[in-house]
Amino acid sequence: MSDHFGGPALFLDRSDINTDEIIPAKYLTEISKEALKPYCLEDLSLEGFDHQSEAMAQARVIVTRKNFGCGSSREHAPWVFEVNDIKVVIAESFARIFRQNMYNCGMMAIELAAPELDRLFELAEYGQVHIHIDVNRRQINAETHTKRLTFNFDITPFDMALVNAGGWINFVDTRY
Amino acid sequence: MGQTIAEKIFARHFRDEPFPGVNILNIDRVFCHEILTPIAINDLIQRGRDGVFDREKVKAIIDHVTPSKDSKTATQAKTMRDWARRVGLKDFFDVGQNGVCHALFPEKGFIRPGQTVIMGDSHTCTYGAFGSFAAGVGTTDLEVGIMKGICSFRPPVTIRINLTGELRAGVYAKDVILYIIGAIGVNGATDRIIEFHGPVVNKMSMEARMTLCNMAVEAGATTGICEPDATTVDYLWPFIQAEYRDRNSALDDFSQWRADIDADYSETLNFDLSSLEPQVTYNYKPDCVKTVGEMAGTPIDQVYIGSCTNGRLEDLRIAAEVLKGHKIADTIRAILSPATPATFQAAIKDGLIDIFMEAGFCVTNPTCGACLGLSNGVLAEGEVCASTTNRNFNGRMGKGGMVHLMSPATAAATALQGSIADARTISAQP
C-alpha cells in the first residue's frame, strides 16, 4: 500500500487554498473524473505558479499550508488530484469536507505541525524534493540530491482503515 | 453534564463507533443535486447497486444549472431525472418546480428540529436554522448516504456564539454572519459546530436564521445551529399541524432539541451587535470584511440578488424597499433570481417584481447559476459584482472576476448608485 504514496513534491506556499482554485466550478459539469485532468489547480492564485508547468505534471505529492481545500464540498477536488496521480496532500490543516473526501477516496491528507512544515519548505530550496510516505511506520521521508529529512505523522485508526480499504464505500461494504 | 444541540442529535441518531472518535449516524434526509450526484449514480449502477435506502428520505433536485444550458448540463439533468424515476423518489424537483435547493427544501417543510441531514453541497448547513444537524459532504459520503442512510462524523465539538444587543435599522443577518466570519476567520470553526444564541437570533425570522447558518461553512464550521422556538413552530405549522394538538405542544416537543444550560462548549464567543454597520467583503476570502462606509464608492459592473444565502422572499422585500421608485445606474446591470418558484410567485403577487423591473433589473428563473459562475450572470475578466451570495473566491462568478458579498439592502443601494453604497443613505420613495 505504501508504495502508492510518494514521488516528486509540489510546494504551494499559501494558506486557505479553496476548492474553486483546485477545480473551477465550470468544470463540474463533467460527469467523468478523467475529464477533469487538464484543469488541476487552474485558478490557483500563487505568484509564479503555472498549472500547465512540467513541475505540475511531475507532481505526486502536494505540500501546502493551513486550511487547504476550504469552500465547496466538491469531491472533484480530490478527484482532479487522483487522475493526476497525486494521492497525498501534506498541510498544516485541512477543511473538514476536503479532508474527509480524500480519505473517502482512499487517499491521504496528512497534517504536519507548522515548524516541521517550515523545515519541509526549506528543503525545497535545495532542489526538487521527492517524498515517500511510509504508511506503516507513519513516516514522511523527504529528500533532495543532497539532503534528507524524516518526519513522523499521526493518522487515526479510521483514516488508516479507509486507506487500507481503498475508500469509504469499500469499508462500508465490509461492515454495514 | 448537559448536552449541546448536536450532542443530543448525535445520541438519538447513533449507529456505530467503528473506532474511537468516529460516529456513524443514521441520516434522516439525503438531498441530491445534479452537480455532485450523477457520478455517484453512475458508480452505483456500475457496482450493480442502483437504488436508494429510502425513497422518501432521499430527495433530489436540479438547481445549479437549470434549465440546462448545454449538452453537458443536459446530460447531468437527464442522469438525475432518469434516476429519480427509476428508483422511485417521492420528491424530485425538475424544471418548473425547481429552485435553489437550500431555499426550496425548507419551504416544502422537509427540515425538522433534531434531524440529521446530508447533501453533496457545502451550504447544507443552512438547515441548522431549524435546529437540525445538517452537513455538506462529498460525492462518496453522498453515495453511501443514498445506499445505506448512514454517514461518519467526528463527535461534535461546539462553539457557542452569543449575539446580544439590538440590530440597527438597515442591518441584517447577512451583516451579522459576515462580521462573525471576519472576526473568527475562514478556519475559525473548522471541525466545530457553531450554536447561535442570544436575543438577536431569537428575534430573527426563519429566513434570517437560514442566512446566518448558510455561511457557517465559510468559517470552516461543520454546520451552524439555532435553537428551535416559537418562530420555528410558526414556520413549520402548515406541515406539522396534523402531528400536534396545537402550537404549544409542538413547541414542547421541539424544546427537546434546545441546548442544556450546563452544556459543554469548546469556546464561547460574545458579540454585542448594537453598533454593527452593514458589512461588505473585499479581496478573495469571506473573512476579508469591512463596513459599507469603508467600501463605499467601489465601482461595480453587476449586481446580483439571489442564492441560498439571500434569495428568499424576505430578502426580495428588503431589496425592493430600497429600489422602490428609483432606477439603477446607467453603468450597472442588475440581476434578480428569486430562489424558488413560490418565492417568485409571491414576489409577483406582492408587486415586488414590478419594483425590480421598473428599477431596471433583469429577473431570471430560480437557479444557483451565477453564484458559482455557471450561468445566468457570469462575469468577464476584470469585472466586479456586488452580490448577495456566499463566496468571493477568485474566479467564483467567472474567471478573473471580483465579487463583493453584502446584504440585499446594500446590493440594491449599490445598483442605484453604480458603486458600493449604504442603503441607509437612499431616500425612501412612497
Image (cartoon, rainbow, N blue to C red):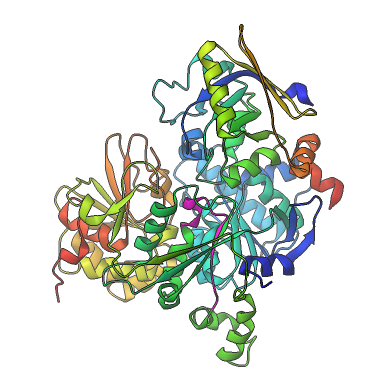
Whether B239 is drawn above or below B16: the answer is below
Measured as percent of width and height from the top left, residue B259 is found at 60, 73
Q: Position of residue A44 (x, y in %)?
A: 44, 30
Which residue is pictured at 28% across the width and 67% down the height?
A: B275
Front residue (pair A130, B3): B3
Q: Residue at x 43, y 63 (%)?
A: B211
B222 inside magenta stretch: yes
Residue located farthest toward the right when viewing the structure as drawn: A174
Q: Is residue A45 left or right of residue A10?
A: left
Residue B322 is one of the magenta-drawn residues: no
B151 sits left or right of B113 in the view: right
Which segment is the magenta one? B215-228
Query: Going by the picture, which residue comes out furthest to the front?
Result: A115
Query: Between A22 and B158, which is closer to the camera in this rendering?
Result: B158
Q: Is residue A58 left or right of residue B164?
A: right
**Residue A83 sits in quarter:** top right
Give B414 or B20, whichever is nearer the viewer.
B20
